[in-house]
Image (cartoon, rainbow, N blue to C red):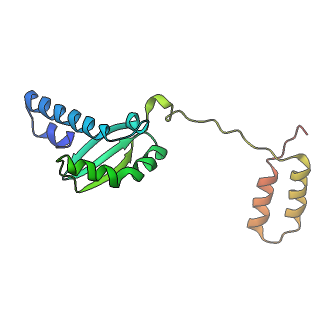
């Protein structure tokens, strides 16, 4: 199976693209049938390139679970006639899960007492860099307390 960039660059005919799409779907279904639930529903794609089968799942957790099954899956695929030398897992985040949404970080605050303690300690330190770092840290105290 050729990567998409190679197919597009070769000016392939629609008929050839249709055949490759069918082959890609068949490979995906073939691999998926050997996976137990719920892992079978987490498989997003299966791509064969130079006898290396890359299996794409949506998260590192599913990739880890899939890695445990690779020896068994490799054997099953070879017994079914698929010439696979190597299997590997890859992660492709699921857009619907909101993985691309930025998360707002809650800014942590020190108590007023902790900020004052840091300032007093910084005043007694001769190392300029350490003293400045402690003073910057002390500026994160909560002024409402």
Camera-nearest residue between 40 and 59? 40
Q: Where is residue 59 in the image (x, y as percent from the top left)?
A: 46, 42
Based on the displayed image, in which of its 4 quarters is residue 106 positioned?
A: top right
98 on left or right of 42: right
Based on the displayed image, in which of its 4 quarters is residue 105 positioned?
A: top right
1 on left or right of 143: left
97 on left or right of 19: right
In the image, what residue occupies the spot 82% across and 72% down? 126
Spot the residue most to the bottom. 126
Q: Quadrant of the C terminus?
A: top right
Camera-nearest residue between 74 and 11? 74
Q: Where is residue 132 in the image (x, y as percent from the top left)?
A: 77, 61
In the image, what residue occupies the spot 49% across and 35% down? 100
48 on left or right of 119: left
Q: Where is residue 133 in the image (x, y as percent from the top left)?
A: 75, 60
In the image, what residue occupies the spot 37% across and 47% down? 90
Number of marks drawn: 0
In the image, what residue occupies the spot 72% across and 41% down? 107
Q: In this view, does 118 lie above or below 104?
A: below
Q: Where is residue 125 in the image (x, y as percent from the top left)?
A: 84, 69
Q: In which quarter of the image is the N terminus?
A: top left
Camera-nearest residue between 132 and 38? 38
């Amino acid at each position: 199976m050729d990567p998409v960039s190679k197919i597009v660059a070769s000016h392939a005919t629609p008929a050839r693209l249709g055949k490759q799409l069918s082959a890609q779907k068949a490979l995906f279904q073939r691999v998926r049938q050997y996976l137990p639930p719920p892992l079978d529903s987490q498989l997003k794609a299966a791509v064969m390139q130079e006898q290396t089968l890359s299996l794409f799942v949506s998260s590192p957790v599913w990739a880890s679970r899939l890695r445990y099954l690779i020896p068994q899956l490799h054997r099953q695929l070879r017994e079914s006639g698929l010439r696979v030398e190597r299997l590997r897992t890859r992660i492709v985040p699921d857009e619907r899960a909101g993985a691309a949404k930025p998360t707002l970080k809650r800014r942590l605050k020190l108590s007023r007492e902790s900020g004052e303690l840091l300032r007093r300690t910084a005043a007694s330190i001769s190392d300029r860099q350490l003293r400045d770092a402690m003073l910057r840290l002390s500026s994160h105290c909560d002024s409402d307390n």
